[in-house]
Image: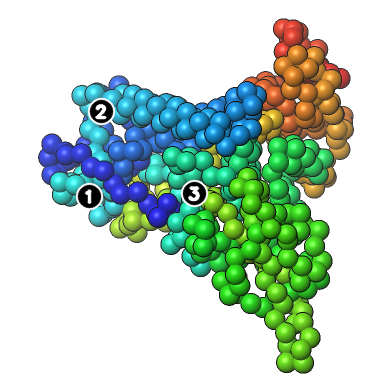
């Protein structure tokens, strides 16, 4: 099953019992950087990684870099028109997967040897679990290896959060992002459960490859944490790519479809009539799910058949079940049940800290209410000489935060007079790599208003940026929030080509407490997207 945890692939260790200065559980960004630094300082280090497929961590193997490789290949396919026919789509997708595998394999190998080739570092492949405050057992293919360490660092990352939907673990064709990025054949139709930024990146990517994409969102508001104008612009961009959205959609069950695809039973709130039959009690139907569902008020209508394999997730209505008096039974509140048939399903409902099987209680390490390893501002756990870095500690789930976590930990180990802490971290930016990338840092207008701040809003259409016109990428908008009396930059939201580069300039200005006038008056090279900051902050 694509959602199940991959089997650990183990390598032999030189000894069944190891005593070391430091043990790092997990080969992620923070852990591997710390391992190299400790080794250079003369410390003996053991790095335990559950799978040989994960040397280097999530980012280079199943996260940032493989997804960006595929996104760039998809954009190229769209620009070249390779997404226009079934044959060219398949060829473009096959080439993209091949390139993605080449890149990840190369980076994985380099990351492994960067540590394993050092005299002070021992890499052990196997699943680790605590047996005491400073002792861990690692299950390898050759048997258990006991490790005793003076200091231990937990860097196990996060794992996809899988909702409790019947059939989700047993139905072929249901994937997390990891499995979907390693398909040999491109799905003609894709349903994405979840409309967070991970789901939207995949929606944009597969739409560029030519897949018909349908996104199911549990509630009625699209990107509820973003400003309404920004969210509307992002949605319009995705819809222009052909992505379809179904709101107030609650997936009730997943099962194999008769045609070899996947069948979802979906309840949609807000319809005027409801249904009481199970999805699998009706014959499979066909038709465009969105043309009918998004505007439907009558659940007795069935969409017309279609034989086009590139149509969006096909749908059959489940008829309302008559009541004892022969009249249709109405749902309270109004709800309609639909059957969606698709080739593949992506479960993109978030990620949760990966702590299962670590037996943290044996070391006295506690968890938060949200299931993350509990840490203080120095990333110390509730057990002495045990730290937690990266996604597992419940902080922002970004590779660059894991790297910054390394800085927090290292500042305590290198004799600094004043250690760097999480509280010293400023203005964490983020980027979502849609067809037009979306990047933001700091407060948006919604948050500034909720905080009671006195602010002005700065806006600039990307179409007004000369370089965007030269690049033939004029879509999007730039928006900034500036404190009225001080000129302090409170935040920025950039839906623009190259926004993932430009946002770092805004972050630097914010970190330095530079007023908006600094960016307004800065001399930029021309033509660039960055020079748009002159006009945005004017």
* Picture colour scheme: rainbow
Q: Residues within 10 Å of mark 3 (few under 14, many from 20)?
A: many
Please state the horizontal and vertical placement of residue 515, each as a whole percent of the image: 78, 22
Q: Residue at x 16, y 39 (%)?
A: 12
- Answer with left or right where residue 423 lies relative to residue 326: left
**Labels 2 & 3 near each other (Cβ < 8 A):** no
476 or 259: which is nearer to us?
A: 259
CA gap, disc 2 to disc 1?
19 Å
Q: Which mark is residue 116?
A: 2
Please state the horizontal and vertical placement of residue 408, each as a whole percent of the image: 47, 33
Disc nearest the viewer among 2 and 3: 3
Disc 3 element: loop
Q: Which mark is residue 176?
A: 3
Q: Residue at x 74, y 22 (%)?
A: 473
381 or 307: which is nearer to us?
A: 307
Q: Is residue 339 visible to us here?
A: yes
CA gap, disc 1 to disc 3?
26 Å
Q: Quadrant of the C terminus?
A: top right
Please state the horizontal and vertical placement of residue 390, each as a whole percent of the image: 46, 40
CA gap, disc 2 to disc 3?
30 Å
Is residue 71 shown above or below 502? Answer: below
Please state the horizontal and vertical placement of residue 484, each as a whole percent of the image: 87, 31
Residue under numbered circle 1: 139
Is residue 247 shown above or below 265? Answer: above
Disc nearest the viewer among 1 and 3: 3
Q: Residue at x 36, y 29 (%)?
A: 105
Residue 410, quarter of the rendered image: top left
């Amino acid at each position: 099953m694509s959602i199940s945890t991959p089997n650990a692939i183990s390598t032999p260790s030189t000894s069944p019992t190891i005593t070391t200065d430091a043990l790092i559980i997990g080969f992620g960004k923070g852990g591997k950087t710390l391992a190299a630094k400790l080794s250079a300082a003369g410390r003996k280090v053991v790095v335990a990684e559950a799978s040989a497929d994960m040397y280097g961590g999530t980012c280079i193997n199943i996260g940032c870099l493989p997804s960006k490789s595929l996104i760039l290949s998809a954009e190229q396919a769209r620009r070249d028109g390779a997404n226009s026919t079934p044959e060219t789509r398949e060829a473009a997708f096959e080439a993209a997967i091949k390139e993605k595998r080449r890149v990840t394999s190369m980076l994985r190998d380099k990351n492994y040897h960067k540590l394993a080739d050092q005299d002070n570092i021992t890499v052990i492949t196997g699943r680790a679990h605590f047996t005491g405050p400073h002792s861990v057992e690692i299950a390898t293919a050759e048997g258990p290896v006991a490790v005793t360490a003076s200091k231990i660092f937990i860097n196990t990352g996060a794992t996809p959060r899988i909702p409790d939907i019947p059939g989700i673990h047993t139905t072929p064709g249901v994937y997390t992002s990891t499995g979907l990025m390693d398909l040999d054949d491109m799905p003609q139709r894709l349903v994405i459960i979840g409309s967070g930024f991970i789901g939207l990146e995949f929606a944009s990517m597969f739409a560029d490859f030519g897949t018909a994409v349908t996104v199911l969102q549990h509630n009625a508001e699209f990107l509820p944490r973003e400003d309404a104008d920004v969210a509307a612009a992002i949605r319009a961009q995705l819809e222009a790519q052909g992505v379809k959205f179904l709101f107030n959609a609650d997936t009730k069950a997943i099962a194999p479809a008769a045609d070899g695809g996947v069948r979802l039973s979906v309840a949609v709130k807000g319809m005027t009539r409801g249904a009481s039959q199970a999805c699998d009690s009706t014959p499979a139907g066909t038709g465009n799910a969105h043309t009918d569902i998004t505007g439907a008020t009558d659940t007795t209508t069935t969409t017309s058949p279609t034989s086009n394999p590139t149509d969006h997730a096909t749908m059959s209505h489940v008829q309302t079940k008559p009541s004892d008096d022969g009249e249709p039974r109405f749902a309270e509140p109004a709800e309609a049940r639909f059957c969606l048939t698709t080739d593949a399903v992506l479960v993109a409902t978030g990620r949760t800290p990966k702590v299962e099987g670590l037996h943290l209680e044996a070391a006295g390490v506690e968890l938060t209410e949200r299931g993350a390893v509990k840490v203080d501002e120095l990333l110390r756990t509730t057990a002495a000489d045990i730290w937690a870095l990266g996604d597992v500690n419940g902080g922002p789930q970004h590779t660059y935060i894991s790297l910054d976590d390394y800085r927090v930990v290292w500042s305590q180990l290198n004799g600094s007079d004043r250690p760097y802490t999480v509280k010293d971290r400023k203005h964490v930016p983020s980027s979502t790599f849609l067809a037009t990338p979306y990047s933001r840092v700091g407060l948006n207008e919604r948050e500034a208003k909720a905080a009671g701040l006195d602010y002005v809003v700065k806006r600039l259409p990307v179409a007004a940026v000369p370089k965007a016109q030269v690049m033939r990428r004029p879509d999007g908008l730039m928006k900034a929030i500036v404190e009225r009396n001080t000129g302090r930059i409170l935040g920025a939201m950039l839906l623009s080509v190259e926004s993932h580069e430009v946002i770092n300039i805004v972050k630097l200005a914010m970190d330095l407490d530079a007023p908006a006038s600094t960016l307004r008056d800065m001399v930029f090279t021309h033509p660039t997207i960055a020079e748009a900051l002159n006009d945005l902050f004017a």
